Image (spheres, rainbow, N blue to C red):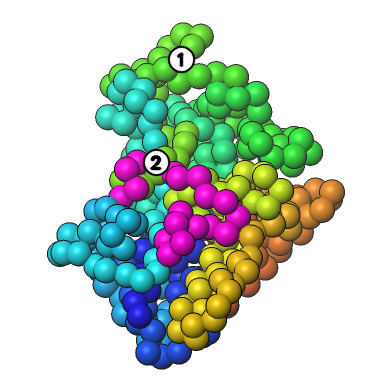
């Protein structure tokens, strides 16, 4: 019996490790990813200030698994009806699959945005943004971050703090543009208000209820006019993986696309047992992955044992434990109804990160991430090439 885990982000790593621990050794597990490393994506913004931190944000996949086969390659297409995955080097057949390919940046077909904006999804993007931004700290200019979700907030906050560290705060203007009426749309009002205060304290110009309609080489077309820029960063939305036709298929709380194919994490739009859409986040992906792994395990055991009745599968009931977001050298956390800022919020963020990394065996990385978060403000350093 063969189980394919497609993608080695938070969801894929969690599914694979749980299945390793709970299925017999004669069940073959194959993990497919374009990279040889697992990226700790929720800390990616830290590389904007500390490129040397990159080594603590990547964990070799070979170090994470005991017996799963790791195949480096790009997933071109998932064909559930044939139980087949098309890879660059040929087809891969499966009995069960967990599709954990994450999401891709979407530009909503806005003219020029994909051509002129830098997205923020991987280390290459982080380094490209940092290189351009260091020049602006010398020459002056305006940075526009399109999208005030949690990623856009963290990027804007990190850039503002880097400017302070480099004595270039007067040289640059950072503008955060959001189509909806507030930063962190969709989150509780008190959480949004605290984030807004943190951004304002760092001199970031927040322009909510402002829609990007397109971009040219030096200007962005907004619904209320033009905005000149020197660096344009796009964090304005996520779309489906090209391997799933560019869509994020909707799945119910069992995470099943069909009986044998599960879609987990940002790759899907997940509806929980209460009929609510589960937000795309690392917290959601990990919890969905645990549910998917339990369900795959039960189905594999049923197939092997030949029981008469199909097993009852778990459905995810997403009740968030809270939310946390970095804003430069600070943070905002919501724990229950309580809003935390500063050192307590940083402690919450560090604890969450350490908990995940420890659960996948990345002890060294857990220690380094905790050190950065608990330090509050990271030491000023250039880390120039």
> Is 321 left or right of 105, judged from the image as shown?
right
The image quadrant where one finds the N terminus is: bottom left
On residue 185, which mark appears? none
SS under mark 1: strand
Q: Residues within 10 Å of mark 1 (few under 14, many from 20)?
A: some
- Residue 150: % across, % down: 58, 43
Q: Position of residue 114 (x, y in %)?
A: 31, 31
Horizontal side of residue 274 vs 297, given as left or right: right
59 and 65: which one is in front? Answer: 65
Left or right of residue 187, residue 381 in this image? left
Indicate the position of residue 88 as horizontal and vertical percent values: 17, 60
The mark total stands at: 2
Identify the main secondary structure in magenta.
loop
Which quarter of the figure has residue 277? Answer: top right
The range drawn in magenta is: 243-263
Q: Which residue is mark 2?
A: 247
Q: CA distance from mark 1 to mark 2?
A: 27 Å
Question: 75 or 221, which is in the foreground?
Answer: 75
* Residue sitting at the far front: 308
Q: What mark, if any, has residue 222 been given in the picture?
A: 1
Q: Judge whether 110 appears above or below 46 on screen.
A: above
Asked whether residue 260 is drawn in magenta, I would say yes
Give the farthest residue toward the top: 225
204 over 131 or under it: above or below: above
* Image position of 219 with respect to 288: above or below: above
Dot placed on the residue nearer the N-terminal end, 1 or 2: 1
Camera-nearest residue between 158 and 87: 87
């Amino acid at each position: 019996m063969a189980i394919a885990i497609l993608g080695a982000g938070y969801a894929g790593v969690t599914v694979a490790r749980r299945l390793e621990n709970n299925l017999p050794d004669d069940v073959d597990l194959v993990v497919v990813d374009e990279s040889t490393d697992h990226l700790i994506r929720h800390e990616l913004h830290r590389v904007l200030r500390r490129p040397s931190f990159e080594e603590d944000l990547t964990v070799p996949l070979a170090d994470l698994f005991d017996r799963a086969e790791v195949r480096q390659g790009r997933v071109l297409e998932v064909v559930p009806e044939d139980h087949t995955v098309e890879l660059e080097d040929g087809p891969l057949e499966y009995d069960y699959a967990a599709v954990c390919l994450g999401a891709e940046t979407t530009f909503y077909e806005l003219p020029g945005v994909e051509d002129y904006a830098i997205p923020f999804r991987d280390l290459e993007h982080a380094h490209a943004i940092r290189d351009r931004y260091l020049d602006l700290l010398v020459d002056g200019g305006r940075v526009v971050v399109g999208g005030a979700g949690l990623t856009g907030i963290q990027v804007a906050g990190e850039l503002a703090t880097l400017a302070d560290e480099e004595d270039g705060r007067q040289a640059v203007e950072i503008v955060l543009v959001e189509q909806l009426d507030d930063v962190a749309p969709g989150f509780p009002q008190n959480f949004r208000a605290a984030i807004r205060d943190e951004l304002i304290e760092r001199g970031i110009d927040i322009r909510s209820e402002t829609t990007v309609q397109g971009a040219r080489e030096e200007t962005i077309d907004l619904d209320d006019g033009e905005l000149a820029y020197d660096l344009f960063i796009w964090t304005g939305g996520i779309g489906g993986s090209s391997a799933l036709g560019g869509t994020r298929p909707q799945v119910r709380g069992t995470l099943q696309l069909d009986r044998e194919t599960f879609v987990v994490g940002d790759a899907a739009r997940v509806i929980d047992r209460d009929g609510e859409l589960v937000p795309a986040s690392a917290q959601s992906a990990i919890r969905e992955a645990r549910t998917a792994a339990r369900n795959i395990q039960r189905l594999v055991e049923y197939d092997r044992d030949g029981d008469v009745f199909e097993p009852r599968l778990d459905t995810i009931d997403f009740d968030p434990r809270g939310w946390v977001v970095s804003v430069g050298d600070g943070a905002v956390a919501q724990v229950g109804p309580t809003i935390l800022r500063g050192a307590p919020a940083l402690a919450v963020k560090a604890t969450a990160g350490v908990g995940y990394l420890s659960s996948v065996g990345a002890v060294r990385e857990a220690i380094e991430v905790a050190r950065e978060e608990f330090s509050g403000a990271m030491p000023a350093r250039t880390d120039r090439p």
